[in-house]
Amino acid sequence: MAWEALPAAAIGAVIALTGTLMGDVRRDRQQRGRERYSDRRKYCVEFTVALTRALGGLRTVTTRGLAGEELRAAAAEAMEPTYVAREQLLLSGTGEIVVAGEEVFHRLVDVRDAVRSGASLDSVAYHDAYHAFSDALWKFRLAVRADLEEPTLSPADLERPDWSDRDRCTVCAARA
């Protein structure tokens, strides 16, 4: 029996096993990357929807004629959809997405504060907060699109002068 064949077979087996393991590791990394991408997309959409729902809730609060503690409680309740979605985003988002997400969240807090102070939908205080929120929401959307490698959008693509919605606002037009 030739002893050279035994080490050669062992070396061949080690090479084959190493190649298989490296392929599995690579596939696992790719799969994890796809899962992170999918989770990030999901959490960004959920956060955007939560922000929009909270804004709708805050708008509704302004029409209910509440004051004092009832008004503060209703405004706080309107914000509830955002908290879990924000935490998911903070944990799974890239740096750019988290920064843009925090900015839009804090602009929504400004809307909440205007509502809690008794601002009506047609007040200057509400509109100043709303338009800053609208602009920040679009910047968040654009950050998400960039992260997901989607084509960029400009306001002109949607026939807008900017992202703030001031051009479509009758209250702001009346102030000008």
Image: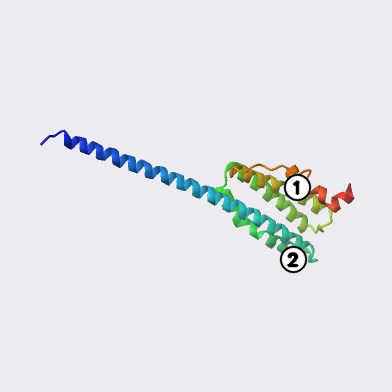
Name which quarter of the figure residue 64 lies in.
Answer: bottom right
- Give x and y (percent) for residue 169: 83, 52
Residue 176 place in picture, x, y as percent:
89, 46
Q: Name the residue under label 1.
A: 132
Q: Which mark is residue 70?
A: 2
Looking at the image, residue 146 sits to the left or right of residue 107; the answer is left
Q: Quadrant of residue 1?
A: top left
Q: How many marks on residues?
A: 2
Residue at 58 percent of width and 45 percent of height: 148
Q: Residue at x 37, y 45 (%)?
A: 24
Mark 1, secondary structure of its residue: helix
Mark 2, Cα crowd under 10 Å, few <14 / some 14-19 / many 20+, is few
Label 2 sits on a secondary structure element that is helix
What residue is rendered at 74% in x and 64% in y?
A: 69
Q: Where is residue 78 in the image (x, y as percent from the top left)?
A: 69, 61
Q: Which amino acid does label 2 sit on?
A: Glu
Q: Can residue 99 be seen in this view?
A: no
